[in-house]
Amino acid sequence: MVILPTYMDHRSYPKQIVGIALKVASTLAFTAMATFVKLLSDRYPVGEIVFFRSFFELVPVLVWLIYRGSLTTILHTRQLPRHLFRAATRTVAMFSGFTALSMLPIADAIAIGYAMPLLTVVLAVVLLGEKVRIYRWSAVVVGLIGVLVILSDYVGVGSSPERNATGALVALAGASFAALAATQARILVRSDSAATVVAYSAAFIALVSLATLSLGWVVPGVGDAALLILTGVFGGIGQVLVVTSFRFGDASTIAPFDYTSMVWVLAVSLLVFGTWPTGTVLLGSAIVISAGLFVIYREHRLGIDRAQSKRVQMPTTPLT
């Protein structure tokens, strides 16, 4: 008599591969978006770029909903205040992130942004009451040390004078607010669809960024207008790909591939902008990524342990 554990079911492997492919594709979409933002940031106000990013993000999301036949339910929610709070935090995160991209090399800005999933663990404990044990706390501490290593290139003793310390701190603030938005999303998706969560925040950010019109926008030419629109379209495509990827596999299997974005960012940094991060930034990035991968691994192990515990308590069907 053999008991076949569900987490070892080989039939799930093809689906997992699809999920991984979608996740990697999402990192390409988000890297393209960040590249466009960086290219535009020296000619257009941040508020204008944020508007195009959020407004045109809705285009692929709406196409996706029409394809799924669920467009009419996109605004159905009983948690409007929480949607607005998440949208407000994501607004600050987006403004901060785009400002950081305008002030820092693209690889450095993305590397500091990797603090977000680590900070999400901390906020999940504080705001959601989740239990985090010593292994994950250790990984978070190590990861944050990695962030400090990256920041040492910008602030403190031995920092490079040509480095923009303000930009580095703005990037860290953006990661913090993105983590806060992520904790709210974890609550919202328990009752609302992911598309609803995206739609509310995108609409809110578009309205807030539109208010910066009075601060002076620049009328774009045809080429720049296309880049501005593509910033939103690729951001929306990335959102759709991320949401869809988790329908094909476990989060603990798919999430680590988010860090493939550093490969694309390094390529863009060298080929498009002619820059390469310092050894300090690369070392700090490696520490942060390693810590993030360990957190994901622990989540995976805990999920397996819970599944095994349930199987011990519940009758199983033998396979002969």
Image: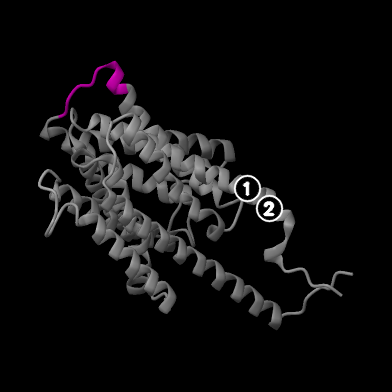
Mark 1 lies on residue: 17
**Pointer 2 residue:** 13
The disc labelled 1 sits on which kind of residue?
Ile
- For label 1, the SS is helix
Look at 58% across and 58% down and name the residue there: 250
224 shown above or below 159: above
Residue 130 position within the rendered picture, expressed as x and y whole percent measured from the top left:
42, 74
Place of residue 24 in the rendered image (x, y in percent of width and height, measured from the top left) = 50, 43
State which quarter of the image contains the C terminus: bottom right
Q: Residue at x 61, y 50 (%)?
A: 248
How far is mark 1 from mark 2, CA to CA? Answer: 6 Å
* Residue 87 visible (yes or no): no
Where is residue 264? Give x, y as percent: 41, 39
Mark 2 closeness class: few <14, some 14–19, many ≥20 residues within 10 Å: few
Asked if the residue under mark 2 is in contact with the one under mark 1, i.e. CB atoms within 8 Å, the reply is yes
Please rate how many residues cluster around mark 1, counting C-alpha atoms within 10 Å: few if below 14, some from 14 to 19, many from 20. some
Q: Can you see residue 168?
A: yes
**Is 73 within the magenta?**
no
- State yes or no: residue 223 in magenta: yes
For the view shown, which residue lies furthest in the top direction?
222
> What are the residue bounds of the magenta stretch?
217-225
- Residue 230, picture quadrant: top left
- 271 shown above or below 160: above
